[in-house]
Image (cartoon, coloured by chain):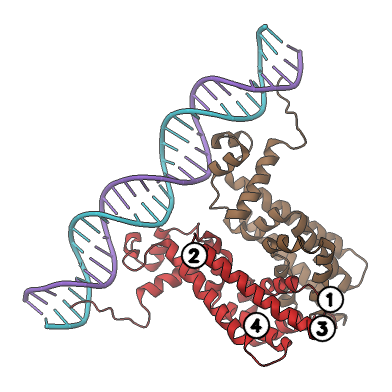
Chain colours: A red, B brown, C purple, D cyan
Amino acid sequence: MAKIKTPDQTSKREIIHAIAAELFREKGFRATSMRELAAKVGIEAASLYNHIEGKNELLISICFKVANNFTQKMNEVESMDSDIISKIEALIRYHVYENVYNYKDVYVSDREWRNMEDPELSKYREMRRSYRKRFTSIVEKGISRGEIKKIDANTAVMIFLNAIAAVDQWQRIVNKVSSEELENNMVTILIDGLRK
Amino acid sequence: MAKIKTPDQTSKREIIHAIAAELFREKGFRATSMRELAAKVGIEAASLYNHIEGKNELLISICFKVANNFTQKMNEVESMDSDIISKIEALIRYHVYENVYNYKDVYVSDREWRNMEDPELSKYREMRRSYRKRFTSIVEKGISRGEIKKIDANTAVMIFLNAIAAVDQWQRIVNKVSSEELENNMVTILIDGLRK
DNA sequence: TTTCAAAACTAACAGATGTTAGTAATTGTA
DNA sequence: TACAATTACTAACATCTGTTAGTTTTGAAA
């Protein structure tokens, strides 16, 4: 036979995906060319197509990897047997975690998903919508149980999701503060507020 | 002479800028073509250049308009003679206001500024950095005065700025909740937290 | 050493892009 | 009505885009 590929841990396909995420994050999906990506991988643009299907596939792959992770976490949290505040805390901590350790993919899926096309675009939108809705339901249950103030649940969820999506600034902060300390700060501010 | 331009309220240049902001918001700067913009204005692409200098100018104009607004507001707030919580509340309310009534420009300046080039890019980055820093200083003063919990001020500011930048979702919520109610929700959640 | 698939290369495509040149139409003013 | 500036148009440019075709190189298995 031949060239069974010595996967020195990571296949070339995975390397391409990783570098693509990096470039999409830095410059945006549209502003990143296949020639630029290829150069950073160390091959010619045409050679990329021995490993991937095309530019769109790269974006689709990144977006759904992230969306699936968050959906799975939501499944876990919903089936937790605990009070509502703890569930929200778990979600916040997971968002922080993903944004710290997986920030390139998370950032791209959050800011560049609009560049997908149907049918993936519709499917992705639906996953986002569903995630928000499930998050909102948790907040609403907290309100009706008296654990949470009577605020608009949609607004609260929107604040949370966006508060947490500041990926490009995370890195700067994580270098000063530990990831755990960051999680604690987030939970404190979002759940108990600023006022002493 | 000739054609002194009857400015039926808005000049064509302003119309072009407004439609550009709309398209940049919907599809992104890179994904919006001059031909598409021209079609929406109702003229040919080449005719745009009788009114504007080029595509980059459109983005630059939008970004700095917004940046200047926020900088000016920060000047006002810094010179307010009030407690720190009130200053932060004033900033939050201004962010909500801008995001509701000026959401296209705000969104574009927040998500598409990376597409600028030097020297504008550097200048814009510096304005953002400065704004964050001044916001952080306010929070830190609040902490040292005992008005605010001992949290990491950088994290707090980052949460605030991003919580507030959820422009595309704002509109959906504003249709259900009034703008004032939205401001109140934001202030409550961010300053006093979720917990009852 | 031969073999053959994997993966690299060169060359080129067809289409889209921002922009310019040159020209014709429009329109308020003289 | 005639002038002249403004603004629209058509045509074209040079460049960049993602991708394909066809070919050569590579490297492990036989």
State how far apart marks 4 and 3 are (Cα).
23 Å
Label 2 resides on the chain identified as A
Closest to the observer: A166 or B153? Answer: A166
Q: Secondary structure at mark 1?
A: helix
State how far apart marks 1 and 3 are (Cα).
11 Å
Q: Are marks 4 and 3 on the same chain?
A: no
State how far apart marks 2 and 4 are (Cα).
25 Å
Q: Is residue A166 visible from the viewing direction of this image?
A: yes
Label 4 resides on the chain identified as A
Label 3 resides on the chain identified as B
Closest to the observer: A149 or D8? Answer: A149
Q: Residue A56, position in %: x, y? A: 44, 62
User: Which residue is under mark 3?
Assistant: B149
User: Which residue is under mark 4?
Assistant: A91
User: Which residue is under mark 1?
Assistant: B141
Question: In the image, what residue type sits under mark 1?
Answer: Lys
User: Which residue is under mark 2?
Assistant: A120
Mark nearest the camera among 2 and 1 is 2
Question: In the image, what residue type sits under mark 3?
Answer: Lys
Question: In the image, what residue type sits under mark 2?
Answer: Glu
**B102 relative to B187, above or below:** above
**A190 relative to A166, above or below:** below
